[in-house]
Image (tube, grey):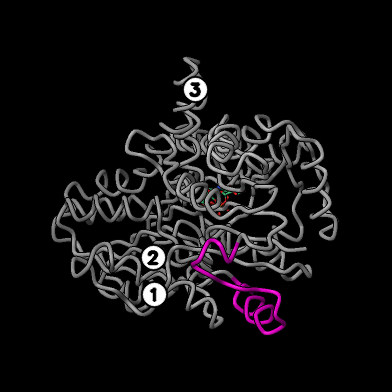
Amino acid sequence: MEIAVFGTGYVGLVTGVCFAEMGYNVTCFDIDGDKITALSEGNCPIYEPGLEEMLKRNLAEGRLYFTNESTNACRKADYIFIAVGTPENEDGSANLGYLDAAVASIGKSLDRDGVIVIKSTVPVGTNERVRKQLEAIIPSELRVSVVSNPEFLREGSGILDTFHADRIVIGADDHEAGRAVAKLYEPFGRPVIQTDVRSAELIKYASNAFLATKISFINEIANLCEHTGANIEDVAKGMGMDHRIGSQFLNAGIGYGGSCFPKDTKALEKLTEYYDYDFKILRSVIEVNSRQKQQLFHKAKELFGSLQGKRVAVLGIAFKPHTDDIREAPAVELITSLLGEQADISVYDPAASGKVSDLFGSKLYYAENADTAIKGADAVFIMTEWPQITEYDLGRYPLLMRQPIIFDGRNCYGLEEAETAGLTYFSIGRKAVNVHDTLKSLKR
Ligand code: UDX
C-alpha cells in the first residue's frame, strides 16, 4: 500500500511517520526544499518525543521517503493525505491558501483514480469544494474521492495519540472510499466512526471548541473561587469525579494557547457568522480566554501599582510543557504587557528560548535555568508547568530573589508548602498566601 502525505508540519509528519511504522510505504511532500533535505537525512524539525527515532528507523528500513516534487509523491500513491496548515486569517477565518496550493499540485500530478484524504482542519463544506476543484483539473476519465479524516493529536504526545486514538473519524459521501480509508487504519486497532463528510468536518471543530469550553468554564469557576474563598482544586476534583463531567481539562490556569484551540474556536465562530447563527457560548469561551490570559498581569499591577523598572522573571513560555511552541502562548501576551510597563524581564524556558528570542530579541534576558532567571527578581511569573518549574526547590525563591513574590498561573505548588517556604504566593482560584506583610512592606 502506497501513501502520500502533503505537508510535513506537525500533523503531516507525525501521520506519515506513524503510517510508515505500521508497514506502509509513505512519501511525504513539502514545498520547503531545505526541510525535505533535513528530513531525508533523519533530522526532525519539530520537538516531539520519540518522533526522530521513529523517523530514522523508517528511513533506514526503506518505508519512508521525502520529496519536494509533487509528481514523485502522487505517482504510485493509493491514498493522498493532505495535512497542510490552515492558519488564521486576520478576521479569524481559516486561511485555505496552503490547502488550495496542495490541491492544485495534486490535480496536476494525478494520473490515475485517487482517494484524497483531508486531515487539515477545514471549515464545513471544504471537502466538497476540494472535490469540485480537483474534478475541474484532472482528466475527465479519472475518478477522485475526497474523504475527511480530522486528527486529534496533542503536541508533545502526537505518537501516543496516533497509536492510542480514542476514535478515528472518517467522513465520506463515497462509501467505498470511506471503507477503504477505514481499512487503512485497521492495523492501529482503534475505534472508527464513519460519518458523512460534513459531520466529520464539524466533529473536529466541535471537539476542540468543547474542550476549550471546559477550560474557560473552569477558569471562570476559579475566578469565582477567588471571590468566594473556595479552592478551585477541590471544586474541580469534586466536579470531575462525576463521570458525566470527567476530570480531564478541568485544570484552571491562565487560559489556553497553542496552534489549535485559539485558531479553531475563532474559525468556528466565523463559520457560524457565515450561517448567520449566533453561537453565544462559543463567543463567551473566546472572550473569557482572552481575559484569563491577562489575569496574572492584573494581579501584579494591583499589587505593585507600576511595574516600571521592576526586575521580573517569567518561568515557562511555551503554551504547555514538553513543546517549544509559543503560538498564542499566554506568556507571550504577558511579556508584551510587561514590556509596555518597562519592566526589566528575564525569561527561562527549557525548550522555547530560541523561538522567544526570534520574537523579542534583545528586549529580554534569556536565562539558562530557573536559578539565573529569578536572581535578584522582585516578582516571578510562572506560565508553563514544566517539571523544571513544578519540581523546583521552593526554598530557592527567597534565597535568590529580592523579594519572593510569585504569581503562579498553573497552580504548581501547594498553598501550605508556599506558606512554609515564606513565599508571597498568588495562584489561580486559590487564596493568596503571605500577602499582608508584603503589602505592608511595599507601602513603606
Ligand atoms: C489540542 C487538542 O487537545 C487536540 O486534540 C487537537 O488535535 C489540537 O489541540 P494541543 O493544542 O496540543 O492539543 O494541547 P492541549 O494539551 O490540548 O492543551 C491546549 C491548551 O489548553 C494549553 O495551553 C493548555 O495549557 C491548556 N489547558 C489544557 C488548560 O489550561 N487546562 C486544562 O485542563 C487542559
In the image, residue 233 lies at what x, y percent?
A: 60, 46
Q: Secondary structure at mark 3?
A: helix
Q: Which residues are magenta?
A: 49-73
Given residues 249 and 397, the one toward you in this image is: 249
- Residue 398 seen in the figure: yes
Magenta residue check for 64: yes
Mark 3, mark 1: which one is toward the viewer? 3
134 versus 341 height, above or below = above
| Crowd around label 2: few <14 · some 14–19 · many ≥20 (10 Å) | many
Given residues 295 and 362, the one toward you in this image is: 362
* Disc ID at residue 315: 2
Tally of numbered discs: 3
| Crowd around label 3: few <14 · some 14–19 · many ≥20 (10 Å) | some
In the image, residue 348 lies at what x, y percent?
A: 36, 70
Q: Which residue is mark 1?
A: 370
Dots 2, 1 in contact, CB < 8 A? yes
- Residue 158 seen in the figure: no
Q: Amino acid at mark 2?
A: Leu
Q: Which residue is mark 3?
A: 272
